[in-house]
Amino acid sequence: MSDVYLQALISGLMIGGVYALVAVGLTLIFGVMDIINFAHGEFLMFGMYGAFFASALFGIDPYLSAVMALPLFFAIGWAVQGVLIRPVVGKSHAIQILLTLGLSLLMQALAQFLFSADFQSLKVDYGSATFDLSGARVSYTRLAAFAISMGMCAALWVFLQRTDTGKALRACAEEHEGAQAVGIDIARMYKIAFGLGIACVAIAGIVMTPFFYVAPVVGPKFTLVAFVIVVLGGLGNIPGAVAGALIVGVVESVGALVMPSPSLKDLAVYVLFILVLLFRPQGLFGGKGA
Amino acid sequence: MTISRRSAVLALSALAIAAGMGAPRPAMAADDIPVGILLPLSGSVAPIGINNRRGHELAIEEINAAGGIKSLGGAKLVMVDGDTQGNPNVGISEVEKLARRDVVAIMGAYQSGVTFPTTQMAERLGVPYIDPVAIADSITEGRGFKYTFKVSPLASWYARDQIRFVVDTSTAAGNPAKSVVLLHEDTLFGTSTAEGQVKAAKEYGLEVLADISYPKDTPDMTSIIAQVKDLNPDALLLVSYINDAVLITRTMKELGVNIPIVGTSAGHIDPAYITNLAKDADLTFTVGEWNVDIDKAGAAEIAKRFEEKFGVPMNGHAAETYMSTMVLRDALERAGSTDRAKLRDALAETRICGDDNILPYDCIRFGESGQSPEAQLVVLQIVDGVHKTVWPPEVAATKPVWPVPAWDAR
């Protein structure tokens, strides 16, 4: 039976890694702009479709798609921020939520119209190859998704800590007016933050395509999980989001074994969520600025 | 303001058209026999309703081409459509409309939720009602209806036949199965089927090692499949929609779980299961209503005519609606009358056996409740990307591959 738990732990960490990249994008956007992007999962879905069609039509490997997606989705995020999000920055949360929620519905309907409601999966030869790790099976594609996601999170962290643009982004997150006062172009920072957030989530979607299905409705589940993770880790806190994601991944996976029915595994996650809101509303790892 | 006569006429005719009164009725000769076809022909389930209708249409065309109903002087059958729109209330009023249009009998209505109340109305009006496709047990069982005749198997027989298949096949392979694990999605479809599986397993002496439900949008099934691997049952019975069905099979391959998968129609019979998994779909079992390759003389021929006429392959629903129309023809011949009460009595005496019945069992006949007691499901196995009938042995096209080999040996 211990094998089963080891398996659950490993697969929880793997999927948690992907959750981390989804959540980091969400928390970055929130940290810098104070906006919760409810259309986050839909960008993940478009990333997945991008990789699916690149593979189905042109035979492009999804990992190559992931590399190409970085500039492409950064540009998409940049444009979406400039056109749609900018007018509501600093407005009431109700307006922001309506806008991003509306965007989410629009993107789902658009995907259904363009790609049909059928779900698809991308087929790669190495899709279900595995290796043995002391009794547990580890899938190469899941391991790759984990490694790439963690690598992206680390790269983002280094970017924020070491580069001038990164420092400017953190300054915006900490204090908008102060940042403006020292000559930081806030409007540009917003676009960069949104572009980076969208690129992260799209890549998270793409690295999942070798083992996960693609459908117009795939997004909301991930938006919800990412939201829980972001609250768990502290809104705007990037290392907190990574840690929160790994915790949620493991709780989901092991919860499916421990709870009387796997249907209740989400319950474990939400109980944790409510407990954190009650007793540590700033999140397990403190608020933004980290 | 005065209204000209002309505009009044225009407005009236517009109203009439809007109300459907202007819709053309099928041209009917004096001795034609109107047959009510009650199906969802618009709304979200319309594609399935339209496909069901094709079975009736093909059968009626063949009956008329062969000289109509001979005991009634060669009278031709004419379809009269009633569109339920997938809505029980609309269905009920359509039954009344069809009854007023003198149909001898009604066939329909695909959805159990519509068939249940519409059979009630037909019973009250004394119109014979043949249910080709809807499966809910409640349509016939315990109601004491005289005018309802159900050709389709009962919903609870899906689980029964899955278990019978597992017992038969594993015994034939020389290693009788002792245990199963049930894995199903957690909405009504999954949970109600699983209840039936638990009962059937008990009845046929199989131990249920675990009864596991999962939410169907779960992104990762690894820990659940690891648990199944650990329990190591002789078969895994699944009730899944398409995306979870694919995810489960993939995860089983990843974890190297070589347990036969027995699906419950739905996701496992969906062609998308094969297109998404390619050769990893092979060797999956699923129960189904019917399959083109079943060993019944004439089945392949009828399926060929169907595909030529409509350009789509004949599926289980169409086979059931086709046979139900043949049941009606047979009863009309024997009744020699279009009187509904006489037709009802003739239907109760139905006995269409052997190769005259393309459904996967010997005789179509009706028990006390109106249910076809011999009705059963088939089990299909995917071989080289095609569904093959492997059970029951009397109609199987090929032998099942059981037990299934290890993934790396496939």
Image: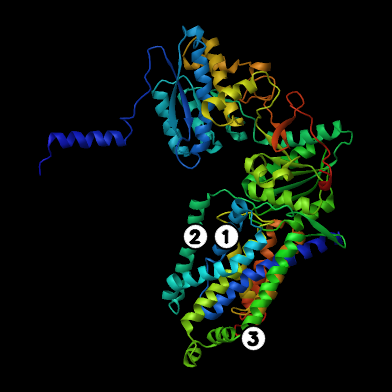
Outermost residue toward the bottom?
A182
Q: Are marks 1 and 3 on the same chain?
A: yes
SS assignment at label 1: helix
Mark 3 vs 2, N-terminal side:
2
Mark sitting on residue A45 = 1
Residue marked by disc 3: A162
Q: Residue at x 47, y 30 (%)?
A: B38
SS assignment at label 2: helix
Circle 3 chain: A
Image coords of residue B181 (percent x, y): 78, 46
Question: In the image, what residue type sits under mark 3?
Answer: Arg
Q: Please state which of residues A133 and B217 is positioned toward the viewer in this rendering.
A: A133
Image coords of residue B222 (percent x, y): 75, 57
Residue marked by disc 2: A107
Q: Please state which of residues B127 and A64 is positioned toward the viewer in this rendering.
A: A64
Mark 2: give few (<14), some (14-19) or many (20+) Cα within 10 Å. many
Q: Nearer the viewer, mark 3 or mark 2?
A: 3
* CB-based contact (under 8 Å), mark 1 and mark 3: no
Circle 2 chain: A
Outermost residue toward the left?
B1
Question: In the image, what residue type sits under mark 1?
Answer: Met
Image coords of residue A98 (percent x, y): 45, 68
Outermost residue toward the right?
B174
Q: CA distance from mark 1 to mark 3?
A: 31 Å
